[in-house]
Amino acid sequence: MEQNVGGVDRTARLVGGPIVALVGILGLLQLVSVGTAVGAALLAVGLVVFGTGVTQFCLLHRLLGINTCQR
């Protein structure tokens, strides 16, 4: 896999992903009134976003021809 996530994009994913996942967990625990379905969706999205930041690869970026890594 060629890396295509870097710089500010990667930082935003590494910071934002866990925050979105945390809101999802709080929604699943009904500590935040977003509903359980929305909480589950937020948890999934947060984990995927964080995972793309860790691996520095995003399939959607690849399909769209986007590369935020500095060369």
Image (cartoon, helix red, strand yellow):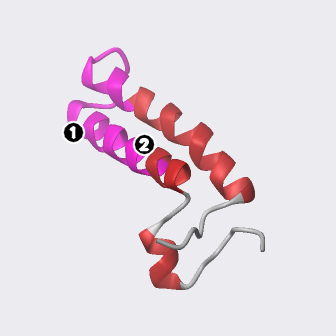
Residue 58: in sight, yes or no?
yes
- The residue type indicated by label 1 comes to Ala
Q: Is residue 22 above or below residue 1?
A: above
Q: Secondary structure at mark 2?
A: helix
In the picture, measured across the screen, residue 14 lies left or right of residue 59, that is right
Residue named by callout 2: 46
Rounded to the nearest angstrom, the CA distance separating label 2 from label 1 is 14 Å
Closer to us: 43 or 54: 54
- Tell me if residue 68 is in the magenta stretch: no
Residue 33: in sight, yes or no?
no
Q: Which residues are magenta?
A: 24-49
Q: Residue furthest right?
A: 71
Say which residue appears at 22% left-offset and 31% top-offset. 36
Q: Secondary structure at mark 1?
A: helix
- The residue type indicated by label 2 comes to Gly
Image coords of residue 50 (percent x, y): 49, 45
- Of labels 2 and 1, earlier in sequence is 1
Image coords of residue 12 (percent x, y): 65, 47
Say which residue appears at 50% left-offset and 54% top-offset. 55
Say which residue appears at 29% left-offset and 40% top-offset. 38
Residue named by callout 1: 37
Q: Quadrant of residue 65?
A: bottom right
In the picture, measured across the screen, residue 9 lies left or right of residue 56, that is right
Q: Is residue 43 above or below residue 23?
A: below
